[in-house]
Amino acid sequence: MGYGDPIPIYFPDYKEDDLCQIFMRYQANRKLYYSFFNENRAALALCRITRQVDELSTALKPLFDKYCEPLNDLSVVPNEDMARRLFSHLEPHIKSSLNEIFMVPSPTFPEVEANNNTMRNGNAKKIDFNMSICAKYLLISAFLASRNPATLDASLFYSKGGSGNQKRKRKPSEKALEQKETAEQELVMKGPGTFPLERLLAIFQCITSVAEDSIEEEGERNYELGVQEGDGGLMSDVPLQLSSLCNASFIVKVGSCPLEGSMRYRTTVSEDLAEKVAKSINFPLSKYLYRI
């Protein structure tokens, strides 16, 4: 007796309103949870990163508990002023909570060195094509976060034009060229910079929204090849792919900043490999890469 091929069925990801309704079903005070979910920028940001109900439930529970701490009566229905005060109490704890959610094991130095040697031996040529779309965009985001100054993020990403939209400058003088050469040498000596998780996710969201057309084309090709990624596979897979990139030593954890109190990361990816990954998804990397 033969068996037919399975028929793939694709379900769209939950929308934010759907997720709110799901979580409210298990709350004693639904209006309180509704206030927490809809007025909380961190909760909405988490929904853009992952749409997995179990992951979100685990991530939101400690935030909701902290949100409710100032309340003596958990049956109260918060008005607009109370909701603002509750969020003000929660806000200082959001960064540390995000770091715990995305915590990944830090590889030892021999593991990092072994991985780098493997890449130098030629295996890196296959890496960019064996990654998911989500991992490719995360890798590019990490590369840009390590190479670009944080002060230029707004002009490079949020204008949706990259560095190519900047006005043409006058021809530099000989002294300016010497300063530029010196700055380039210092940048090479300094190496890739570190970045917090919040900046990585912000860049990821910006470049994926700009490259939306390329993502849809890639999704159509995957559908024709039978690759099941779902309608929202890109955004819903971020925590898993970030952990995988860290375990593979493409992104390494370098400790926490004493002033910010948040974990910082650095990418070990070379510009050549970043360009190969970018080309595989038709992303204009050079347009968003800061050049001195």
Image (cartoon, rainbow, N blue to C red):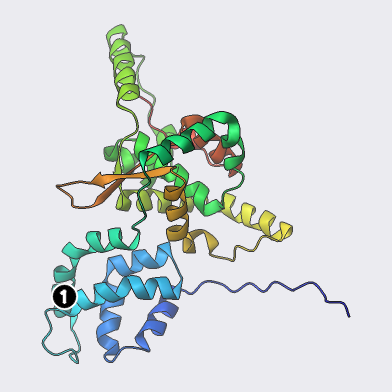
Name the side, left or right, on which 186 lies relative to 248.
left
Give above or below for 73 relative to 140.
below
Counting from the top left corner in percent of width and height, residue 152 is at: 30, 38
What residue sits 43% from the left and 35% below the top?
Answer: 113
40 w.r.t. 134: above or below: below
The relative height of residue 32 versus residue 240 in the rendered view (above or below) is below
- Give the total number of marks visible in the rendering: 1
Q: Position of residue 211 (x, y in %)?
A: 52, 49
Left or right: residue 96 versus residue 108 is left
In-front residue for pair 164/284: 284
- Residue 93 lies left or right of residue 210; in this view the side is left
Instruction: Farthest residue to the front: give it.
Output: 110
Q: Amino acid at mark 1?
A: Leu
Q: Quadrant of residue 33?
A: bottom left
The outermost residue toward the top is 174
Nearer-the-camera pick, 51 or 216: 51
Q: Is residue 92 above or below residue 85?
A: above
Image spot of residue 78 (x, y percent): 18, 84
- Which residue is at 44% across, 75% downward? 53
Quadrant of the snapshot with the N terminus: bottom right
> Measuring 23% from the left and 60% from the top, which residue is drawn there?
96
The quadrant of the rendering that contains the C terminus is top left
Find numbered disc 1 in the image and state the secondary structure of the residue it sits on.
helix
Q: Nearer the viewer, residue 2 or 80?
A: 2
Please rate how many residues cluster around mark 1, counting C-alpha atoms within 10 Å: few if below 14, some from 14 to 19, many from 20. Answer: many
x then y, percent, for residue 287: 46, 35
Choose top left, top right, bottom left or bottom right for residue 31. bottom left
Give the labeled residue for mark 1.
86
